[in-house]
Image: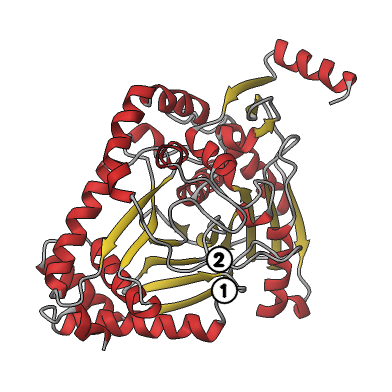
Amino acid sequence: MSDDKRARLKQLLANGEIKLHPLSLSQRELWETTPVPVSDPANHICSLIFMRGKIPPEMTRQVVQRVVDRQEALRLSFLPGKDQPFQMVRATGEANIKFRDLPEAQQRPDALEEAVQEIFGEPFDLMHGPLYRIEMLSRSADDIVLVFAAHHTIADGWSLGVFVQDLWASCLGLMKGAKGPLPPVPMTYSAWSAAERAQWPVTELEQRATYWKPLLKDAPRLWTPPVRRPGEPHALRRWVTEIPAPLTQAIQDLAKKHHATLYSTMLSAFQTTLCQWTGGEDIVVGSPVANRTHPSMKETMGYVSGVVPVRGQVVRDRPFSETLKVVHESTMDAFANAMPFAELAKAVGDVPSPGHNPLFDVRFALQNHPVPEVGLPGISMKLRMRSTGTARFDLACEVTQDGNVLELVWLSRDSLFTQPEIEKLNDLYQLVLTRACQAPGQTSAALMS
């Protein structure tokens, strides 16, 4: 940093325009435990917001500005430090939004996707910010696609729902003639970061680590990651399919009948599927946890979520109904003993290396954060998530309830898996689920045969 910039920073700190805070524990995870460079576009959170109604560009800018004024995370960047960066929160910030009218030729799905990927893939300047961008793509006067991309350091999946809810509240307020700002959030992101750090003193981390060390001892890898080629992108291939409505209902009925959660039921079948697909019977996956149990954090944007390792043994001669019971109990224990992942990786002595995420290479998620669809006569907003920043893993399966079906998003690394292999994995997963629902007394071996 030049002397002039250093002097300017001191001035901004002195007058309160900028405040510095230590990294949150979730942010530390990105800097300390992921094999993907923090600045890589693979760490972007991305979504599309489909808007219907006549919302002129200048009104959209005002709508977004009110959200930026409310959400500290949208005014956050990072100041490099000797050991680790600091959060740098600005008191004010201008809405970072662009506008583009799409000619008819660019409204085709493939052309729209190309434009969206260009917006998603542009790197962020972590120091100068802002660490989000919005582009309003107008297909007609009342048909708009709002593209929203944010760096994972300032947002998670839950944040996308909060963003849409705030957009809607801001838009509704302006339509009713409101002049003032949106109500402040009950707890700012920096206040939550400080409270979270205070919640995890060294003694508590050491105590929690006593649960994880024996549980994760000698946990195997399902495959050996290939050497990453120079210039190879970190982003994962994305493929979306769904579990049809009849099978979705059967899975929900199975979970209810056996007093298990939908997550435990889907995970039991997923681990059984991975056993058949890889030949490994000792399966470790990472699952996200929202970390928003306190009501004051439900309206705050920011990287709050964590990740929990879930280890399971696939016993081939055990009935699936018994497997479901074991998995349900073990996952409840794992989530009850969750701790900051950066500290967990350090405690068990596993560190990231190129192409190697600590502890596990597979992510399994049941997305339960709010995905709002809001509207009034003449205007509506509908959120569709595109990426939740999972490029540190080799393989991911993300499950989301979408009406009466379950949407499956498969993310996979090109250098490890071909698209036909992922489609075969999906077919196998749905077959295991179907057989488990039809006859939960069958053994895992029978489900996989």
Q: Alpha-carbon distance for marks 1 and 2?
A: 8 Å
What is the secondary structure assignment of the residue under circle 2? loop
Amino acid type, residue under disc 2 in the picture: Pro
Q: Earlier in the sequence, mark 1 or mark 2?
A: 2
Q: Which mark is residue 429?
A: none
Quadrant that contains the C terminus: bottom left
- Percent position (x, y) of residue 406? 35, 72
Crowding near pointer 1: few (<14 within 10 Å), some, many (20+)? few
Amino acid type, residue under disc 1 in the picture: Leu
Crowding near pointer 2: few (<14 within 10 Å), some, many (20+)? some
Mark 1 near mark 2, Cβ–Cβ under 8 Å?
yes
Q: Which mark is residue 225?
A: 2
- Percent position (x, y) of residue 26? 49, 39
Q: Nearer the viewer, residue 4 or 185?
A: 4
- Percent position (x, y) of residue 357? 52, 54
Residue 418 in the image: above or below residue 65: below
Residue at the extreme front? 218
Residue at numbered disc 1: 416
How is the structure coloured here? secondary structure
Residue 8, image quadrant: top right
Q: Is residue 384 left or right of residue 57?
A: left
What is the secondary structure assignment of the residue under circle 1? loop
